[in-house]
Amino acid sequence: MTPPAETPPDAGAVLEIDLAAIVANWRKLGARHRGGPVAGVVKADAYGLGALHVAPALHEAGCRHFFVALLEEALPIRPLLPGALVGVLNGLMPGSEKDFLAHDLTPVLGSLAEVESWAAAGRRAGRRLPAILHVDTGMARLGLDRRELATLQQDHARLDGIALAYIMTHLVASELADDALNEQQRARFQAACAALPPARRSLANSSGIFLGDGFASDLARPGAALYGINPTPGAANPMRQAVRLSARVLQVRKVAPGESVGYNASWHAARPSRVATAALGYADGFHRSLSGRATAYFDGRPVPLVGRVSMDLTTFDVTEHPTVTPGAWLEVIGAACTPDDVAAAAGTNGYEVLTSLGRRLHRVYRAQADGAQVDGAHIHGAQA
């Protein structure tokens, strides 16, 4: 394979991010979700791919609902998203009300204490302030628990000063279509909303969109599926791949039978071998748990990882690839080795694979379906 045309000569690894694919995935999810629009969840720096680039691309395509986890994630993207709702999922930290007001951000209220703080802010401001109410239906992390929910259902006046934009919950096991928890949560959510003031509802996440029309609501909140992670494990991935990670070969050396490679001599050559050392390691988000388990690709053919992944370097057996020489590029995430494939080898999930991608990677953003690169002066190679 060849790297992008403008790859700097000193780049050790290149991460290509296909904004057009992310937009296409958002549109596909929107077409499938019959209840209402779909948001763009861009928390954790758009799952490691760069919220400053992903969020504006989705906004330009028509997305008007965005979610992040933290207030500090919302502040940089807020000016880039005129007219859009920007919700903060982790809720209202004490003393942060003024920042939400100043930057037109919408808190996701997950406790009675947060409800009371935001309602008081609304009364001080002399107007009802928009918020999203989070009801816990089984995750037991954030959201009003049964006791708090019952209190609010019996006393709607606690919401004075608040304009409910949505009531939401979060599905526990939506990637498992046959899990009984899905229907239990849907029923609990319906019952919870029935005793609250009328408001639009938000139920499905990425996988929830694929559970059928019973899980449609006024707003879906897909995250991982936007970035190419399979929302239907066990079935073909309906989403387009959005990333490719390539690593430059720094050296190729001959290794005799019986000789070891890497830390702790965890791999020994069983034959006369050629081993390529690539400029990629766990400091770049290529997990150490991939040692001896991952596969890269060269010209579409598999190249096994041998030895231990170290901080800056990883070694691959290129004995079957005589054309691999220093300066060649190996594809370690791409069409043949998706984030889900890498996750399976690492014993994790595709979410962690993407969100681990490091800042040392040279980043290239592609904004058009024909693969054209975004203006280099503004985005190409930026650290996102």
Image: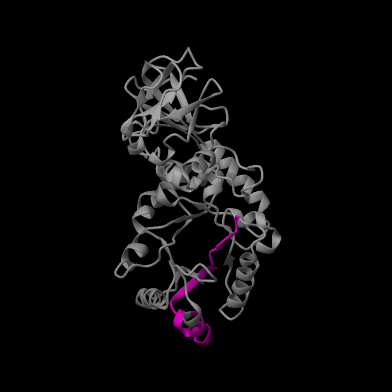
Q: Residue furthest front?
A: 258
- Side (left or right) of 300 relative to 328: right
Residue stretch rendered in magenta on the structure: 149-175
Seen in the picture, residue 67 relative to 287 is either above or below; the reply is: below
Q: Residue furthest left?
A: 95
Q: Residue furthest bottom?
A: 154
- Residue at (45, 67) in percent of width and height: 141
Seen in the picture, residue 235 relative to 179 is either above or below; the reply is: above
- Residue at (59, 40) in percent of width and height: 24
In the rendered image, is residue 201 in sight?
yes
Query: How is the structure coloured here?
Result: one colour
- Side (left or right) of 264 relative to 189: left
User: Which of the pair 306/90 is nearer the observer?
Assistant: 306
In the rendered image, is residue 4 in sight?
no
Seen in the picture, residue 384 relative to 144 is either above or below; the reply is: above
Q: Check residue 155 for magenta coloring.
A: yes
Q: Position of residue 185 (x, y in %)?
A: 60, 69
Q: Residue furthest right?
A: 213
- Marks counted in the figure total 0
Q: Position of residue 361 (x, y in %)?
A: 37, 33
- Side (left or right) of 39 relative to 16: right
Q: Position of residue 22 (x, y in %)?
A: 54, 41
Q: Check residue 62 for magenta coloring.
A: no
Q: Position of residue 384 (x, y in %)?
A: 37, 40
